[in-house]
Image (tube, rainbow, N blue to C red):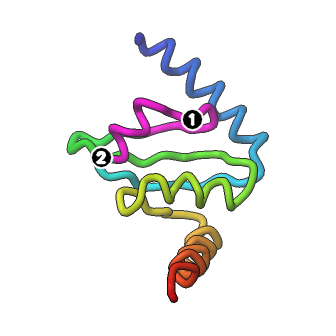
Amino acid sequence: MCIRDRDYVAKIAAAKMKRSKVTARVALDEVATWLVQGVGKPDMTMDQNEDGTSTVDIGVPDEKTLYRWLLTLTTHAKILSPQSLVSGYREFLIKVRDSWRT
């Protein structure tokens, strides 16, 4: 992909993110980076680091959609911002954990 194509794709992704109700910055380790590169999401831009990790800005319709997507990545992803989503995801994970207690 040439630089011009990447710029175009980034502009399209940015426009789609503006329509999303929730936007988050998420850190991905090398495993999650590999997985996300293969699948991708239309409302996402990725900045990949030389060590294989990456940071993504992702737009989703609501918080629960983001949290469910993060669950698929298990410990390979971490919300960096905004803080309200970090706190909300922590509460979501506590509810998930508690649902498995007997």
Q: Quadrant of the N terminus?
A: top left
Report whether 64 appears left or right of 82: right
Give how far across and how far down residue 42 sits, in percent.
61, 31
- Depicted 34 relative to depicted 98: above or below: above
Residue found farthest to the bottom: 102
The quarter holding residue 99 reads: bottom right
The amino acid at mark 1 is: Lys
Mark sitting on residue 102? none
Q: Say if the magenta span includes residue 35.
A: yes
Q: CA distance from mark 2 to mark 1?
A: 16 Å
Give how far across and how far down residue 36 sits, in percent.
43, 38
Between 73 and 20, the one lying in front of the other is 73
- Write the residue at 53% across / 21% down: 7
- Depicted 59 relative to depicted 67: above or below: above
Between 49 and 85, the one lying in front of the other is 85
Q: Which residues are magenta?
A: 32-46
Give how far across and how far down residue 93 sits, in percent.
54, 75
Residue found farthest to the front: 102
**Secondary element at image label 2:** helix
